[in-house]
Image (cartoon, rainbow, N blue to C red):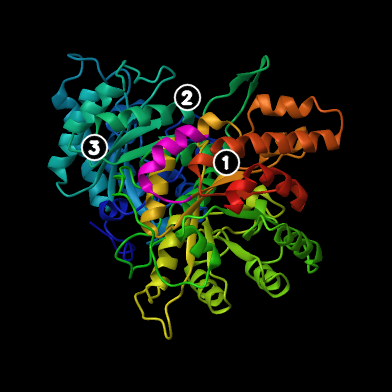
Amino acid sequence: MSHDLQTNLPPFLSELSRRVILCDGGMATMIYEKGIYINQSFENLNLERPHLIKNIHLEYVRAGAQVLETNTFSANSFKLSKYGLADKVREINLAGVRLAREAAEGKAWIGGVVGPPGAEVEGRAGEVSSDRIRSVYRQQLNALIEGGIDILFLESFAHLPTLQMLCELAREVAPSLPIVATVHIGADGRTRLGADAKEIGDAFEAMPADVVGVSDGTSPALLNDVLDALRIHTSKPLALLPGAGLPVPFEDRLLNMATPEYFMELLRKGINRGAKLVGGSSGCHPEHIRAINSSIKMLQPGVPETSAQPLGILTNEVAAPAPVELKVFETPSRFAAKIRANKFVVSVEIDPPVGTDATKSIEAAREAAVSGLVDCINIADGPRATARMGPIDMAMLLRDQVPEIEPIVHFCCRDRNILGMQADLIGANALGIHNILMITGDPPKLGDYPFATAVYDVDAIGALRIAANLNSGKDLAGNPLRGDATRLFLGAGANPGAIDLDMEIRRLEMKIEAGANYILTQPVYDFSLYERFHSRVEHLRIPILLGILPLASFRNAEFLTKEVPGMHVPEPIRKRLQACDDKESARLCGIDIAREALERALPTILGTYVMPPFNRVDSALAVLEVARSRIEA
């Protein structure tokens, strides 16, 4: 077994236990698009067109794939005999492993791919003996193992007993080799032979496979649903390797939804639902893998080798922590002191300027301070992925020119690696900026620079842990800080209207464990969603500042719903705004809607966080009138 090029990667399964790992996409799709017709064996191209296969692997490596799957899906004698190639099983499989390994250059694990024997064999009891199937697959398995694979993929099977038999054979042939077993899912959410999620999950539990899951299929969204159902029936790590999907009906025509962005969003949901090994199959190009890689960086940060615990990793099962008490340490933050005294607090968000002139932003902050209703100004960090003045710089201007009001700085993970984060946090503390709100940040594709590199070394959970380390007097590597520890008062966000509220609550629990002292919510318009959220987080005993965004117009509501991640304005609210005759009446209607939401929530919150459109502080102050008695008390 040759591993000459595989010198710098840890064992696959131990790494999978720490983080999500990304596979490549559809080999057959790429081969076909290179001009190779389906009247020949794609696997034989390992011998006939090795440069073609190696270059496809290289495209996936450059896109960020951490596992390369060999071009050996049909490299067994059942399939190769159709092309008169049954005598080349060993040669084709060895070449497949070699080409993947050469392309990887030690940067990716090599997954030896074994596909099903075909409908004429699979599931037809009595026509092909199990001894015959085992003999055919033993030949392929021996060749892949001889080539030096790191992982075995038994991929896209429809007949569970055949998959069980081959898992057992693989474990017999290579006892320590990690095995990934996946089934192909049809449009009805079952295998081709009719097995549902429970039958699949029960079968997976009985197999000697290390990772189990779903692959290919007619729709990535459907595979997400099947994966969700599988979680109930298997305790093993889950793999999600969907095809890009078929065109779907839309207004009497077919619409191809298989864009990288669409695929990325669905795979991100799959990760949130517990998938640990993700990638693509039929129809998935390097662009799809590149998009997923960006999403993984946002959801799950990289982990420095010196760190004993991964930062910000989303886990499949997160137990609810015991009720959390606020982390109390001396800080000059008046905002922190007020929260700890259980007093109602108010923050108003003001965006930093697009350019060097901060006059209007400072004037807006001064208007808020003069009102006597506002404690803090929230300063966003590159909102909607636009280029603006940095929030720490804006906070310094605000502190110098409007000292009676405190800044809360949004700290975005998108633009900083873990070194830059620590530098900025230490610097902010030294400059007297102590209120920090940790956010993961909108991806660059939402703004003016869609091709900008997103860092996402950590997400908001990881960033909170970094800041908590600094508050304890140490950097991320465990080195003591020279001088005093930082005294950062840390906050985090939450979305009461999250589609997957269970995952939102799990992440919120992790944020509190990581060091969050207060929560700012996304804007709330549907009060029933907030009530549901509040009932789920009461046990956490953490101060909640309710997000309120007074809508400026129907167009503003439509933009927030369609273009801003995590935002949704219910249709009845939008219709109220649409019925307004002019801009001013729409603005006043938006204020009334915001007042209604804030007034209903007052008994359950410790404060509010108002986000007036276009820095219109007068709109924020008008909303706050309904809370004046609570504020003044």
Task: Kindly identify which residue carries mark 1.
Answer: 566
Q: Does the magenta stretch include residue 323?
A: no
Judge left or right: residue 497 versus residue 484. Answer: right
Nearest the camera: 503 or 98?
Answer: 503
Asked if disc 2 and disc 3 are in contact, CB closer than 8 Å, the reply is no
Distance (Cα) linking label 2 and label 1: 27 Å
Which residue type carries mark 2? Thr
Rendered location of residue 423, percent (x, y): 52, 75
Residue at point 36%, 74% (across, down)? 477
Judge left or right: residue 453 versus residue 44. Answer: right
Which residue type carries mark 1? Gly
Up-down relation of residue 11 to residue 553 (above or below): below
Nearest the camera: 431 or 341?
Answer: 341
Q: Nearer the viewer, mark 2 or mark 1?
A: 1
Which residue type carries mark 3? Ser
Q: Does the magenta stretch include residue 535?
A: yes
Task: Kindly identify which residue carries mark 2.
Answer: 218
Magenta-highlighted residues: 530-543
Rendered location of residue 11, percent (x, y): 26, 57
Q: Crowding at label 3, few (<14), some or many (≥20) Cα neighbours within 10 Å? A: some
Task: Kindly identify which residue carries mark 3.
Answer: 235
Q: Crowding at label 2, few (<14), some or many (≥20) Cα neighbours within 10 Å? A: many
